[in-house]
Image: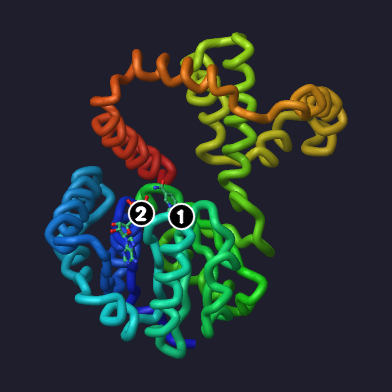
Amino acid sequence: MNAIRTVAVVGAGLVGQGWAIVFARAGMDVAIFDAREKAEAVIGAQIEKAVGDLAAGGLCDDPASLLSRIRFATSLQDAVASCDYVQESAFERIDVKVDVSRAIDAALPAHAFVGSSTSGFPGSDFYADCGNRARMMVVHPVNPPHLVPLVEIVPTPWTAPEVAARARELMEQVGQSAVSLSREVPGFILNRLQGALLDEAFALFAEGYATADDIDRTVRDGLGLRWAFMGPFETIDLNAPKGLADYAERLGPMYSGFAEQRKANRDWVPEAVVRADAERRRVLPAGALEDRRSWRDDMLMRMVRAKRG
Ligand SMILES: NC(=O)c1ccc[n+]([C@@H]2O[C@H](COP(=O)([O-])OP(=O)(O)OC[C@H]3O[C@@H](n4cnc5c(N)ncnc54)[C@H](O)[C@@H]3O)[C@@H](O)[C@H]2O)c1
């Protein structure tokens, strides 16, 4: 099996730029192709800033050599034809995913394989016509991928199991933390978990039990403190004297009661969305969102450093 030396990043908005940093940071050569005008000038500057922030945050020792491994290709074919792996991160529109997958398929070297960053579409919705579909799957990151390591590897019914296994190895090689799904499910794992929490948060808010900020506080000063280093199964395993099964016996009926109560209505009530948004905009005016995203990224860097011990 060939080692992965060169990666094509097709589509370099928020997520593609982070991917370029992930692969270049691991010592790989990266060829970016993005369809927008003046891609090199605009995207190049954004990547330089992100790498500068990483270096300032103590998470990149040699920003100049990382940046020297990233080049801008003149066409999709130019990026893909000499690569070992393609990470596609174009717009989240099914027509775009279909077109870009076909173009990648046509240029793909015989040994190379492809992961799409799509957040919402199963790969089988856009890879069906590709001759190389056995070497194509979803490799879904969390934004920004150079700071949040999780990726979900989701095979289509056509993906060869050994290629999905290679994608996992690649992700581990570049320092990401990979989750392998056995088959397609809408939302994969991460967004289904996030969706369950958001459903309940909106329902509690809509029914007036607490402010949006107090519901957020419950996560940031409660549940979330543990979640940075353990998941829901490990959490309950430690929260009953004899472990997970003991917890399920003690508290399972209580959780079933909640689920029963919520079955009828999982929609986000529009009036509650307007009120929650108004509360957020009082705390954080729309003009300050960008600064707050920088703060979030700075906090993420501190978390990454803390987790490294
Ligand atoms: N933003 C997130 O939080 C997030 C998280 C995980 C996954 N994703 C997924 O990653 C993908 C990209 O999302 P994003 O937030 O970076 O979007 P974005 O709009 O910031 O970037 C998309 C980029 O793709 C380029 N593009 C569009 N069509 C193209 C084509 N045919 N060829 C080459 N380049 C093309 C655009 O010029 C743009 O720069 C989407 O599938 C999205 O669902 C996003």
Residue 65 vertical position relative to residue 284 in the rendered view, above or below? below
Q: Tell me if 301 is positioned left or right of 94 in this view.
A: left
Residue at 80% across, 31% down: 247
Of helix, strand and loop, which one carries label 2? helix
Front residue of this view, candidates 63 and 276: 276
Rendering quadrant holding ligand 1: bottom left
Q: Earlier in the sequence, mark 2 or mark 1?
A: 2
Residue 126, percent across and down?
53, 68
> Residue 15: which disc?
2
Q: How is the image coloured?
A: rainbow
- Is residue 219 visible in the rendered structure shown here? yes
Dot 2 beta carbon under 8 Å from ligand 1? yes
Name the residue located 55 percent from the left edge and 36 percent from the top edge.
227
Q: Residues within 10 Å of mark 2 (few under 14, many from 20)?
A: many
- Say few, some or many: other residues with alpha carbon within 10 Å of mark 1 (under 14 / 14 to 19 / 20 or more): many
Residue at x 40% of width, y 19% of height: 280
Residue farthest front in this picture: 95
Q: Nearer the viewer, residue 125 or 244?
A: 125
Picture disc at residue 141? 1
Q: CA distance from mark 2 to mark 1?
A: 8 Å
Q: Secondary structure at mark 1?
A: strand
Between 132 and 36, the residue placed more toward the observer is: 36
| Position of the C terminus by quadrant | top left
Q: Residue 199, position in %: x, y?
A: 62, 29
Of all residues, the one furthest to the bottom in this rendering is 110
Marks 1 and 2: in contact by CB < 8 Å?
Answer: yes
User: 21 or 205: which is nearer to us?
Assistant: 205
Figure quadrant of residue 163: bottom right
What amino acid type should be assigned to the residue bearing mark 1? Pro
Q: Is mark 1 within 8 Å of ligand 1?
A: yes
Please tell me which residue is depicted at 38% across the width and 56% down the height of the picture: 91
